[in-house]
């Protein structure tokens, strides 16, 4: 049997217990079958499968009684898991100084016999017991004691299997969530590619018209803008292809970057009208982030702030601060704003306000929900504060 570790490291024992997520779980027939069998073999009416945390003794199965828990300090099983023995038998608690004054003995319960086998997991931690008890004294035979120990091993096997099943279910759910996130990210990225493509198209059309007339400085500026936008687009596509082959890079591949330089790169991918001013943080900062994630988040927030701004002179102001745990961003605009009843809903899947933007297009409902999902994977969050007609401010946090 594995070495008992309870007495020397209770904190680790409790951590091991909680890893099974079994406390206050529902009844399960497999466990009830074992307590029923223990009662029949020992010829004792009450049999329990118990688990003990820092305050309570809780019964996963309770054959012969409707009681489902007890205070730890009153529990016989607390002594059993701390005894270092593979079974603790108390033939007459009223004559045992540990239990003679215990309310479980002197009170209405009148426990007159107890036998408990510690449930010791594969790491040697005693999590609880399989025990039998009665209001009459008993003597267990060697065969009954060995059978009780065997049943206790069956209990441990079942909770180990139960934990593995729960772990597998959790892993499957995380995989499903990851697949959904990747699909949403791909949809959002494809959506955002339209911004630099629009810039390329507009500048190319303007370039063609000017080239038909005469070359000038303005033409050269359009060429430069065209080249810059194209390079940014190619870089974005290359990054998307890289992440599509190894999705985990989306989260794990981080780099030290200059904040304002990265913001300027993002702005270069967006078609910014002449009447919209983009205001960057006054002080520059160095960040350690996943560049592709940061770009997608800021592309969406900036695009929305521009698209839904109906002011003659609009602005988008980006603010930044940090503390020991988080990077904190604010993206403020003076656009059309968002009614308060939609402040949570806009981050939901496929939710749209049915509002057309400055280009007479409607939103897809993909962007903000993906931003929230990306931030969630990075242990961050996003929220909004807005007054309709005056503008909106989005608050995003990224875990360092």
Image (spheres, rainbow, N blue to C red):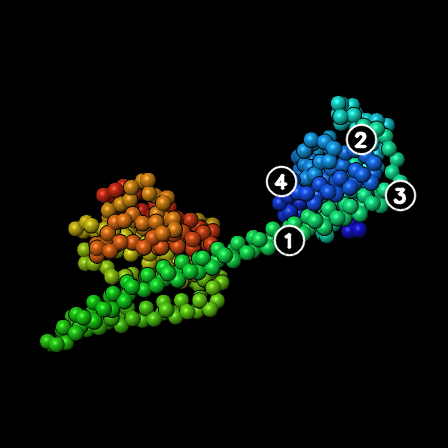
- SS of the residue at dot 3? helix
Q: In the image, what residue occupies the spot 62% across and 40% down?
A: 26
Callout 2 touching callout 1 (CB < 8 Å): no
Which sits earlier in the primary sequence, circle 3 or circle 4?
A: 4
Which sits earlier in the primary sequence, circle 2 or circle 4?
A: 4
- Residue toward you, 57 or 331: 57
Write down the quadrant of residue 149 in the picture.
Answer: top right
Query: Residue 164 bears which disc, if any?
Result: 1
Write down the quadrant of residue 292 in the picture.
Answer: bottom left
Which sits earlier in the primary sequence, circle 3 or circle 1?
A: 3
Residue 251 in sight from this viewpoint: yes
Callout 3 touching callout 1 (CB < 8 Å): no
Q: Is residue 169 above or below residue 48?
A: below
Callout 2 touching callout 4 (CB < 8 Å): no
Q: CA distance from mark 3 to mark 1?
A: 33 Å
Q: CA distance from mark 3 to mark 4?
A: 33 Å
Provide the residue designation for mark 4. Answer: 26
Spot occupied by residue 282 in the image (x, y as percentages of width and height): 31, 54
Spot occupied by residue 232 in the image (x, y as percentages of width and height): 32, 68
- SS of the residue at dot 2? strand
Provide the residue designation for mark 3. Answer: 142
Q: Is residue 40 above or below residue 103?
A: below
Spot occupied by residue 257 in the image (x, y as percentages of width and height): 40, 62
Q: CA distance from mark 1 to mark 4?
A: 17 Å
Q: In the image, what residue occupies the spot 14% across and 73% down?
A: 209
Q: CA distance from mark 2 to mark 4?
A: 25 Å
- SS of the residue at dot 1? helix
Spot occupied by residue 202 in the image (x, y as percentages of width and height): 20, 67
Query: Residue 134 bears which disc, if any?
Result: 2
Q: In the image, what residue occupies the spot 81% across and 43% down?
A: 148
- Residue toward you, 97 or 259: 97
């Amino acid at each position: 049997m594995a070495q008992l570790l309870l007495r020397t490291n209770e904190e680790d024992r409790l951590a091991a217990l909680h890893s099974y997520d079994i406390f206050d779980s529902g009844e399960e027939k497999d466990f009830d079958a074992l307590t029923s069998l223990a009662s029949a073999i020992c010829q004792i009416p009450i049999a329990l499968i118990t688990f003990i945390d820092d305050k309570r003794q809780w019964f996963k199965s309770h054959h012969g009684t409707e009681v489902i828990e007890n205070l730890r300090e009153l529990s016989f099983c607390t002594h059993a898991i701390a005894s270092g023995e593979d079974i603790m038998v108390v033939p007459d608690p009223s004559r045992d100084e540990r239990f003679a004054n215990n309310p479980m003995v002197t009170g209405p319960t009148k426990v007159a016999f107890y036998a408990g086998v510690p449930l010791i997991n594969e790491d040697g931690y005693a999590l609880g017991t399989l025990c039998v008890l009665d209001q009459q004294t008993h003597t267990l035979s060697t065969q009954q004691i060995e059978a009780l120990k065997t049943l206790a091993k069956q209990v441990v096997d079942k909770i180990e299997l139960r934990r593995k099943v729960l772990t597998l279910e959790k892993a499957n759910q995380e995989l499903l969530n990851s697949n959904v996130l990747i699909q949403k990210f791909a949809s959002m990225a494809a959506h955002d590619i339209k911004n630099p493509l629009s810039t390329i198209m507009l500048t190319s059309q303007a370039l063609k018209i000017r080239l038909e007339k005469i070359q000038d400085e303005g033409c050269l500026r359009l060429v430069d803008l065209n080249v810059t936008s194209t390079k940014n687009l190619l870089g974005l596509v290359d990054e998307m292809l890289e992440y599509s082959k190894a999705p985990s890079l989306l989260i794990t591949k981080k780099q030290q970057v200059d904040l304002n330089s990265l913001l300027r790169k993002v702005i270069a991918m967006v078609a910014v009208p002449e009447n919209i001013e983009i205001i960057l943080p006054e002080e520059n900062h160095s960040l350690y982030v996943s560049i592709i994630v940061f770009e997608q988040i800021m592309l969406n927030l900036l695009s929305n702030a521009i698209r839904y701004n109906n002011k003659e002179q609009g602005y988008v102001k980006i603010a930044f601060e940090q503390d020991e745990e988080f990077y904190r961003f604010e993206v403020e605009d003076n656009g059309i704003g968002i009614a308060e009843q939609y402040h949570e809903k806009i981050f939901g899947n496929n939710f749209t306000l049915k509002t057309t933007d400055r280009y007479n297009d409607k939103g897809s409902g993909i962007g903000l929900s993906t931003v929230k999902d990306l931030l969630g994977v990075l242990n961050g969050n996003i929220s909004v504060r807005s007054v309709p007609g005056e503008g909106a401010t989005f608050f995003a946090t990224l875990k360092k």
